[in-house]
Amino acid sequence: MDIIIKEQSWPAKWAAFFLRKKTMAIVIGHTIHLWNASFRDFCLNEKWKRHELAHVRQFEQYGLVTFMLKYIGESMIRGYTKNKFEVEAREKENGLDSLEMVNFICRKK
């Protein structure tokens, strides 16, 4: 599976602003958008890769529109950290999910 990584991406910048975070990653489909983080930093962090890969799989399960609506709804009801999609992604961070079949591809601005 190919996953595109976009550095200094405006969707991640917007999410970082909204959540008051210095760095941010946001997944849209098979693309991971980064803000104030480099492709190299991302690729060296196995937990982070597993976390974001969990979101890619959530997108695959629900589809773009349905996932976005469910994710936003969860965040509005439970808050960002208790959002069930974030809880699941955090649980995957220390899992044994293989990253061998995943190809992370950097797309610079």
Image (cartoon, rainbow, N blue to C red):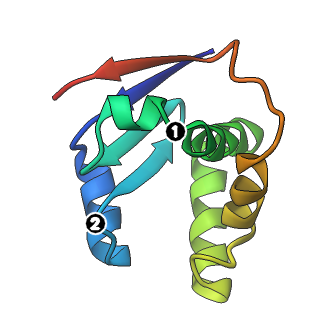
Instruction: Kindly identify which numbered label has been placed on residue 90.
Output: none
Query: Who's the residue at 32% across and 59% down the image?
Result: 23
Q: Position of residue 68 (x, y in %)?
A: 57, 57
Query: Who's the residue at 80% across and 32% down the image?
Result: 97
Q: Quadrant of the C terminus?
A: top left
- SS class of the residue under badge 1? loop
- SS class of the residue under badge 2? loop
Question: What residue sits right under mark 1 in the picture?
Answer: 45
From the viewer's perspective, is residue 59 above or below residue 11? above
Mark 1 or mark 2, which is nearer the start of the sequence?
2
Residue 17 picture quarter: bottom left
Please state which amino acid type lies under the numbered disc 2: Lys
The reply, left or right, for residue 24 in relation to residue 73 is left
Foreground mark, 2 or 1, reads 1
Q: Position of residue 25 (x, y in %)?
A: 42, 50
Question: What residue sits right under mark 2 in the picture?
Answer: 22
How packed is label 1: few (under 14 Cα within 10 Å), some, or many (20 or more)? few
> Hey, which residue is sitting farthest right in the picture?
96
The reply, left or right, for residue 89 in relation to residue 17 is right
From the viewer's perspective, is residue 35 above or below residue 82? above
Query: Who's the residue at 28% across and 66% down the image?
Result: 22
> Hey, which residue is sitting farthest front in the picture?
44
How packed is label 2: few (under 14 Cα within 10 Å), some, or many (20 or more)? few
Q: Please name whichever residue, 71 or 15, is drawn nearer the observer in this view of the structure.
A: 15
